[in-house]
Amino acid sequence: MQFDKQLQRQLSRRQLLKYTSLSSMGLFLGSCGVSNQSSIFQPLNQKSGNARELFEPLNQSIEQLIFQAKNPAPEYPVSAVEPNALLINSFGITPVIDPNSFKLVIDGAVNNPMQLSMSDIQSLPLISMVIRHICVEGWSAIVQWGGVRLYDLAKLVQPKADARYVYFESGDSYYESWDIASALHPQTLLAYQKNGQGISIENGAPLRLASPIKLGYKQSKWVTRVTFTNELLSRRGYWVDEGYEWFAGL
Ligand SMILES: Nc1nc2c(c(=O)[nH]1)N[C@H]1C(S)=C(S)[C@@H](COP(=O)(O)O)O[C@H]1N2
Ligand SMILES: [Mo]
């Protein structure tokens, strides 16, 4: 995969230069997205000061699971976008999250738990894809999403070898869980753009899941926390716990 090689090159160059502080991340990855030189990746624990440790490839056991994942889902040209077809579908309140103070927590079965600001996230490669969003309520929409691959975030936090699931908590108390292969699939993004603009609050700002390999109810909006686990907990998903299928693959 071309993009992975690119990221790998950037990261190994960084390793060669033996940067020990993550505060230089914005400088390096700035060419790929919005640069933010003052940003630092804020570790949740003491372990993480060392860039070498953070930018290693994922461990073999997890890479194998990802390669077993199925082929890419279809993408569309930008001209196919249906700007009005994406209906807002939220079970309850619409949380308003201040993007300036927001920190995405990534924790659980990982070696380097982190809290990332939107600037940190936007200094990682910006991936854009035009995909079909499908809601089980009988509507679909071709949407362009822009954001960061969960795979790239996983490279920072380094899931442990026995991590198998990823939990997503949302600002409206929605929750979801995914198998790790689908979560780290190259087309699974934490998106902050929709149809070329900043994502609206109703569509899940500042960060929402977007992936063409899962049904609409798996695409959590207002994601505040990503937790890797080695087992599936009884609380599996807001709609899943009402009887909808857990895997919900397309
Ligand atoms: N946090 C949260 N995420 C959510 C939902 C929700 O109610 N809360 N609804 C889901 C459903 S059923 C669908 S189809 C999509 C709809 O996304 P949209 O409102 O941006 O069109 O969001 C999904 N993600
Ligand atoms: Mo949905």
Image: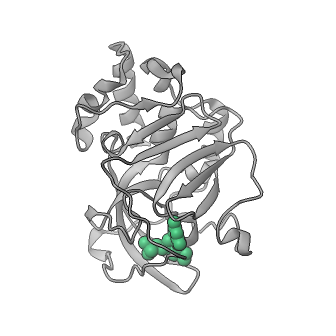
Residue 25 location (% of width, % of height) = 31, 29
Q: Residue at horizontal 29%, vertical 24%?
A: 24
Location of residue 232 with respect to 199 vertically, above or below:
above
Residue 223 location (% of width, % of height) = 48, 56
Residue 108 appears in view: yes
- 232 to the left or right of 155: right
Location of residue 167 with respect to 115 vertically, above or below:
below
Q: Colour scheme used in the picture?
A: one colour
Location of residue 222 with respect to 34 vertically, above or below:
below
Q: Residue at horizontal 31%, vertical 76%?
A: 80
The residue closer to the viewer here, 243 or 184, is: 243
The residue closer to the viewer here, 250 or 175, is: 175
Say which quadrant the N terminus sits in: top left
Q: How many marks?
A: 0
Say which quarter of the image contains residue 23. Answer: top left
Extreme residue in the bottom direction: 138
Residue 184 appears in view: no
Say which quarter of the image contains residue 124. Answer: top left
Residue 203 location (% of width, % of height) = 39, 70
- 32 to the left or right of 4: left
Say which quadrant the C terminus sits in: bottom right
Q: Residue at horizontal 52%, vertical 59%?
A: 170
Residue 90 location (% of width, % of height) = 50, 75
